[in-house]
Amino acid sequence: MLISLGAPTDIAHAMLFLASEQAAYITGQTITVDGGSTLPESPVLMEQFYRSKVSQLDGSLSQENIKT
């Protein structure tokens, strides 16, 4: 998977579409233009998820050592 930053034209294309007649029936929506980085399976979110799990595991192991 290629991860890259978005370009100003990526946002501009979405804005142009929303300002066009083709988007006339769209109302009250949030359109996220982020290249998929907020998808549950995105590498960024997966890394955060696994880091939090490792931190939780490290914390629970430390608590077990204190109890014994």
Image: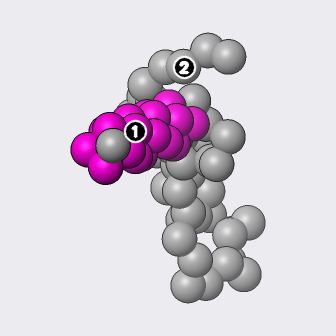
Indicate whether residue 4 is drawn in magenta: no
Residue 56: image location, x then y, percent: 41, 45
Mark yes or no: residue 52 visible.
Answer: no
Relative to 7, is 36 on the left or the right? right
Q: Which amino acid does label 1 sit on?
A: Leu
Residue 36: image location, x then y, percent: 61, 41
The residue that label 1 is drawn on is 61
Structural crowding at the residue carrying mark 1, measured as other residues with C-alpha within 10 Å and reported as few (<14), some (14–19) or many (≥20): few
Mark yes or no: residue 24 visible.
Answer: yes
Q: What stretch is highlighted in magenta?
A: 45-67
In the displayed structure, 32 sits above or below 34; it is: below
The residue that label 2 is drawn on is 3
Relative to 37, is 57 on the left or the right? left
* Residue with the most extreme left position: 66
Return the mark for residue 1.
Answer: none
The residue tagged with tag 2: helix, strand or loop?
Answer: loop
Look at the image and tell me in which quarter the C terminus lies: top left
Name the residue located 67 percent from the left edge and 16 percent from the top edge. Answer: 1
